[in-house]
Amino acid sequence: MMTASELRAVQNHRERWGNETSVAFAPARVNLIGEHTDYTGGLVMPMAIGFRTLALLTPRSDNKAVFYSANFEQEAELDLNAIPLESHGEWYDYPAGVAWVLQQDGVALKGFNMTLSGDVPLGAGLSSSASIQVATLLALAGYLGLELPLERVATVCRRAENEYVGAKTGIMDQFVVAGGVENRAMMIDCRAMTYDLLPLPESIRVVICNSMVKHQLAGGEYGDRRDEVETGQAVIAQRRPGVELLRDATLADLEACADQMSEASLKRCRHIITENARVLAARQVLLAGDVVAFGNLMKQAHVSFRDDFGASCDEVDTLVEIANAIDGCLGARITGGGFGGCTVNLVEAGRAEEFVTAVKAGYKAATGIDADCFVCAPSDGALALAKKSLGAE
Ligand code: GLA
């Protein structure tokens, strides 16, 4: 079922450019646990959620790509003969980056007009950028007749983000946005690029609360953290043969190298090593149906993110504290890249609505800010959505 704004985007696209020949939907994601572990080969546990981006494509006869953002009501044009590696800090960097990577990979592009329309909150830590990239790629795949397995979709979109947009992110967002499955959380092993689908018990709901503090991955802070992590990782790799990635390091390895790295690197690496262990524990307790233990791991993950990783902010900490004090909330933590954005909260199913009312009131009283809150369920990723819509034709 299309939303009213999607239907408007379709109508507008047809009036502007004629009927579409290729369509794709890509969701957003929320990460339950496993933060900043992905780019050191670690473990994450996100799920795709109901917000999504729609991409509609109609061929053109010349060798240009024209993108129209229904959200910004802006158009951007790209010469496909040789796409320059040049980002502008604008919304169209995301679709242009995807076209650029395909061209780098030797795919022969042909002219097209594309409309993008989405309801993913921007800068909220819910992966609006991966959602746009994956929707763009799948609409292009339909047009160009490309067969793209999950790993390739995730890799192309991650390269668009890393190399074209210039945000040094890991693979988590693109992977789950493309590969998510309805009613399942997805534990991803970011080194092996394999995953495990985990059902969420009926007794709980996942509630997202937006602190309304915007974060930006291409801004400096995410990259600074990553540099601190990689410097620490390099020290361990040098001193502990066989340990190339933090994924393989233990706290004992870290301790043994502590005198060789900055205090910041030590703390960032400690967060990552303990976070990988928490993700594994979260998988175990989830399979055992122990939602209280899962909530406790989320609480611990927030403390580690705040104190060791140093990537939370006052508003988000306040939002987490308020949530953790509400009856029926099993655990709350920041989600995504950090420095603002959203919290993810595990809440007893019967109390989700009262939780939303209480957390909004508490946050407003403490900060004067109105938080947007969403009760969500794990949704299909873009590849499953594409398969289902083919089946429906
Ligand atoms: C952003 C990045 C991801 C990941 C998270 C933190 O969402 O895109 O690759 O690093 O931050 O877990």
Image (cartoon, grey):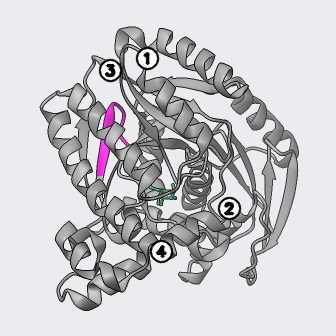
Question: Residue tagged by mark 4?
Answer: 228
Mark 3 residue crowding within 10 angstroms, few (<14) / some (14–19) / many (20+): many
Ligand 1 within 8 A of label 4's CB?
no
Question: Residue tagged by mark 2?
Answer: 95
3 or 4: mark nearer the eye: 4
Q: Looking at the image, which residue is at 62% across and 56% down?
A: 136
Q: Looking at the image, which residue is at 25% across and 49% down?
A: 278
Q: Which residues are magenta?
A: 180-187
Left or right: where 228 falls relative to 219: left
Task: Count the numbered circles shown.
Answer: 4
Left or right: where 108 falls relative to 317: right
Q: Earlier in the sequence, mark 4 or mark 1?
A: 4
Observer able to see residue 393: no
Q: Amino acid at mark 4?
A: Glu
Report which quarter residue 392 is drawn in.
top left
SS type, badge 2: helix
2 or 3: mark nearer the eye: 3
x and y, in percent, of residue 296 in the image: 28, 34
Q: Earlier in the sequence, mark 2 or mark 4?
A: 2
SS type, badge 1: loop
**Residue 326 image label:** 1
2 or 4: mark nearer the eye: 4
For the N terminus, the image quarter is top right
Ligand 1 within 8 A of label 1's CB?
no
The residues bearing labels 4 and 1 have C-alpha atoms spaced at a distance of 35 Å
Closest to the observer: 169 or 76?
Answer: 169
The residues bearing labels 3 and 4 have C-alpha atoms spaced at a distance of 36 Å
Q: Is residue 185 magenta?
A: yes
x and y, in percent, of residue 129 in the image: 62, 54
Q: Earlier in the sequence, mark 1 or mark 2?
A: 2
